[in-house]
Amino acid sequence: LHIEYIIPLLMVAAILGDNVNYYVGKKFGGWILNRPDSWFLKKKHIEKATEFFNENGKKAIIIARFMPVVRTIIPFICGVTNLNYKTFITYSFIGAVLWVGVISLLGHILGQFDIVKHNLEKFIFGIIILANMPLIIRIVKAQFNKNKTEE
């Protein structure tokens, strides 16, 4: 496998995935939001993603690439809110290039070290924890604030 072929292919895949999600949000967003919660889609997740999007604006499309749960919902929110497609695709492209480029090159470079090769499971586990850190911090903060107000 040649990384110089894989990275552009993954960038195209990331952009296409975002486009499908944007289209689903644009086409079916109202219908989906008016339905009761399911195991797959909960209104509270949509509300949090919308809040994140409103707070961070267009840069949220880029930032979301690096946040596992949010990365899936933001393109949908962009479609639901009828964000201008040209704006969406521009920031989606920038986000895909940064996300795929950084993650792929980092993995490729780190994979050259013996310590990583011999402890791959630990590194993968660490990456998963780091990628979810913003979500973990929010949950801990919310729990702390909830306990504080109950006192």
Image (tube, rainbow, N blue to C red):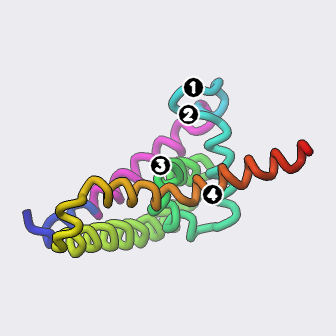
Disc 3 target residue:
72
Do residues under tags 1 and 2 come within 8 Å of each other at their CB atoms? Answer: yes
The location of residue 29, given as percent across then percent down, is 58, 39
Crowd band around label 2 with a 10 angstrom C-alpha radius: few (<14), some (14–19), many (20+): some
Residue 73 vs residue 102, the one in the foreground: 102
Real-space CA distance between mark 3 and mark 1, rounded to the nearest whole angstrom: 16 Å
Report the residue at 46% width, 61% height from top.
130
Do residues under tags 3 and 4 come within 8 Å of each other at their CB atoms? Answer: no
Amino acid under disc 1:
Ser
The location of residue 109, given as percent across then percent down, is 22, 75
Give residue 38's mark.
Answer: 1
Disc 4 target residue:
137
Crowd band around label 4 with a 10 angstrom C-alpha radius: few (<14), some (14–19), many (20+): few
Residue 47 vs residue 116, the one in the foreground: 116
State the SS at label 1: loop
Classify 149 as above or below 31: below
Residue 22 visible in image: no
Q: Which residues are magenta?
A: 11-31
